[in-house]
Image: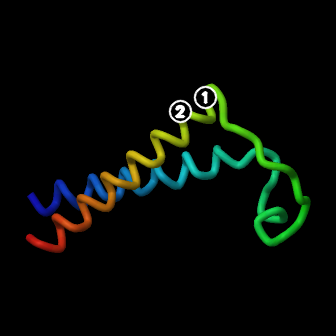
Amino acid sequence: MESILLVATIIIGVLIILLTLFQGKGGGLGSAWGGAGGGFQTRRGLEKWMLRITAILVFIFFAISVIKLLI
C-alpha cells in the first residue's frame, strides 16, 4: 500500500510540474520577478482545462500526502 502511494505521489508530482510549465503564456521567468507588466486575461479553452486539471491534481497530491502521513 505504501509503495503504491509513493508511486502515485511521484507520478502526480511530475504531472503537476509539467502542467504548470505548459501554462506559462510567453512570460517565462522574467515576468515572474516583476518584468513585462501585462494585463489580466481570462483563461479560455485548453488553458482553462489545464488550470482545472492542475488544481485537481494538487488536491489529490495533498490528499495522498496526508494519507501517507497517517499510515
**Total label count?**
2
> Is 35 placed above or below 7 here?
below
Q: Residues within 10 Å of mark 2 (few under 14, many from 20)?
A: few
Which quadrant of the rendered structure holds the C terminus?
Answer: bottom left
Image position of 53 (left or right of 37): left
Which quadrant of the figure has residue 2?
bottom left
Q: Which mark is residue 49?
A: 2
Distance Cα–Cα, label 1 vs label 2: 5 Å
Look at the image and name its color scheme.
rainbow
Numbered disc 1: secondary structure: helix
- Residue 59 falls in image quadrant: bottom left
Please tell me in which quadrant of the rendered image residue 9 appears.
bottom left
Cβ–Cβ under 8 Å for marks 1 and 2: yes
Q: Residue at x 48, y 46 (%)?
A: 54
In the picture, the disc for residue 46 is: 1
Within 10 Å of disc 1 (Cα), the crowding (few <14, some 14-19, many 20+) is: few
Q: Quadrant of the N terminus?
A: bottom left
Q: Along the line of sight, which residue is nearer the eye, 20 or 49?
A: 49
| 60 on left or right of 1 | right
- In the image, residue 58 above or below residue 67: above
Q: Please name the amino acid that badge 2 sits on.
A: Trp
